[in-house]
Amino acid sequence: MSTSAINSVANSAGMSSEETQARLPMKVLGQNDFLKLLVAQLAAQDPMNPQKDTEFIAQMAQFSSLEQTKVMQSDIAALRMQQDFVQANSLLGREVILQLGSEDTVRGVVSAVDIEAGTPKIVVNDQAYDMANLLSVSLVQPQTASTAPLTSTP
């Protein structure tokens, strides 16, 4: 059933759009949802056989651990993105060979680093390429100026 169908049924029942959206199931549970479940569990428990407080503490510890894992996962993703950017920056001024297809390669000097959708791309020959296409990296050989041997005049 689509959301518009749910809204039309809810509107005919006299519910506002906000009330309808509040009643739709959410995909992610948060800390507030856990606390609501905990309060409901406490209110509905058997007064003659209540749950022990250690059970609630264990549940809270598990939920806290889950929250910390989520934060750590996002921190690691941010760290990886920064590391990719540093790696791309280290290629500036270096000669690279990139694999484009099964037979196609591009050779050139990395002139810039662009960020597209949070992912660094190296710019070679005025074209941005993904770092996954990188085959080899080498130092650019400096151009030596040709100099004629000095001759001394008597």
Image (cartoon, rainbow, N blue to C red):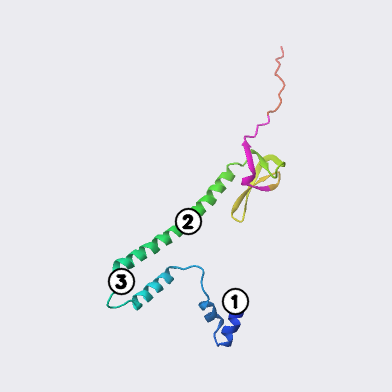
Question: Disc 3 marks which residue?
Answer: 51
User: Viewer-nearest of labels 3 and 1?
Assistant: 3
Q: Nearer the viewer, residue 131 or 60?
A: 60
Say left or right for 5 vs 67: right
Q: Quadrant of residue 11?
A: bottom right
Q: Secondary structure at mark 1?
A: helix
Residue 98 - label: none
In the rendered image, which residue does mark 1 sit on? 3
First of labels 3, 2 by sequence position: 3
Please say if 126 is above or below 61. Answer: above
Tally the numbered discs.
3
Task: Choose the circle earlier in sequence order: 1 or 2.
Answer: 1
- Give the residue displayed 32% in from the left and 67% down from the top: 55
Q: Is residue 54 rendered magenta in the image?
A: no
* Image spot of residue 120 (x, y percent): 60, 50
In the rendered image, residue 34, in percent from the top left (x then y), is placed at: 41, 70
Q: CA distance from mark 1 to mark 2?
A: 32 Å
Q: What separation in Å lies between label 3 and label 2 (alpha carbons)?
A: 33 Å
Q: Residue at x 64, y 34 (%)?
A: 140
Q: Is residue 43 left or right of residue 141?
A: left
Q: Are marks 1 and 2 in contact (CB under 8 Å)?
A: no
Foreground residue among 38 and 49: 49
Q: Amino acid at mark 2?
A: Gln
Which quadrant is home to the C terminus? top right
Disc 2 target residue: 73
Q: In this picture, which residue range is highlighted in magenta?
A: 128-143
